[in-house]
């Protein structure tokens, strides 16, 4: 499974890239707003930091305006892909952009039926929002399982399942076990994935034992 980082903070992206675990980046208008920087500046810097897909989301709600924004964003760097909402206008734009060879990430997916529509429209990625489903009493990972299972039945579906709205490391584990293609993970969850008390205790013991080795000081 590939790992994307879900942030517009270039310092966090640089840190993850240095570790060697980063395959791509997802952003959204809320994350860009938190950066306090112009949108184009943020996307260009991210594209310099990573070789993989960088999602840049449109803010228009009608097809033609979405296409205008998408074509502009796609001209900034070869690894920009366009993030579109899972609406009729969004899928209309997705279909056109796919025909033009521009990659797309269809976002705000909350059901397998929506994911099937996005796949037929040619989406490069579909982003089910597991955390937001959990928030309303549904099991978000059940939807991921349904999407992966449905897609696996058809050889002509190339859309990758990108698990989004990840809230904790267990979401990542379950996504991998279900066969999702990508998990986009906020920096805080990446840090949690490293953590285990046995790792800390083991390292502490190794270092303490090393001090007793002659000549180790």
Image (cartoon, grey):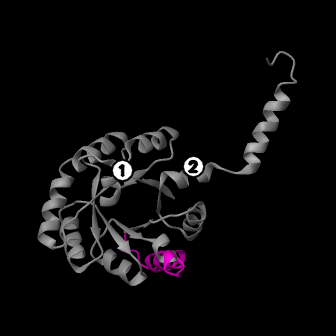
Q: Is mark 1 on a helix, strand or loop?
A: loop
Residue 112, placed above or below residue 105 = below
The magenta stretch is: 135-158
CA gap between label 2 and label 1 equals: 17 Å
Q: Earlier in the sequence, mark 2 or mark 1?
A: 1
Residue 91 on image: x %, y %? 24, 75
Q: Say how many tags the image has.
A: 2
Residue carrying label 1: 8
Residue occupying the far bottom of the picture: 113
Marks 2 and 1 in Cβ contact (< 8 Å): no
Residue occupying the far top of the picture: 215
Q: Is residue 203 left or right of residue 168?
A: right
Q: In this view, does 10 lie to the left or right of 177?
A: left
Residue 97 falls in which quadrant of the image?
Answer: bottom left
Residue 4 on image: x %, y %? 44, 54
Residue 127, placed above or below residue 38 = below
Residue 110 falls in which quadrant of the image?
Answer: bottom left
Residue carrying label 2: 191
Residue 78 within the magenta-colored segment of the rendering: no
Quarter the C terminus occupies = top right
């Amino acid at each position: 499974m590939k790992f994307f980082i879900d942030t517009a903070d270039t310092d966090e992206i640089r840190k993850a890239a240095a570790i060697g675990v980063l395959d791509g980046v997802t952003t959204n208008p809320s994350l860009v707003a938190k950066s306090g920087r112009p949108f184009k500046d943020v996307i260009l810097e991210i594209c310099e930091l990573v070789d993989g897909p960088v999602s840049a989301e449109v803010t228009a709600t009608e097809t033609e305006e979405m296409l205008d924004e998408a074509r502009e964003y796609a001209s900034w760097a070869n690894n920009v892909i366009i993030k579109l909402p899972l609406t009729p206008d969004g899928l209309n734009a997705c279909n056109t952009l796919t025909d033009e060879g521009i990659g797309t990430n269809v976002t705000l997916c909350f059901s397998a039926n929506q994911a099937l529509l996005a796949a037929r429209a040619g989406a490069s990625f579909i982003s089910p929002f597991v955390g937001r489903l959990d928030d309303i009493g549904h099991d978000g990972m059940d939807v991921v399982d349904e999407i992966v299972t449905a897609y696996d039945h058809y050889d002509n579906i190339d859309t990758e399942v990108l698990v989004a709205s990840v809230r904790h490391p267990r979401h990542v584990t379950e996504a991998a076990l279900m066969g999702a293609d990508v998990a986009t993970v906020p920096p805080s969850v990446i840090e949690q994935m490293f953590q285990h008390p046995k790792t800390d205790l083991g390292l502490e013991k190794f270092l303490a034992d090393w001090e007793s080795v002659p000549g180790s000081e």
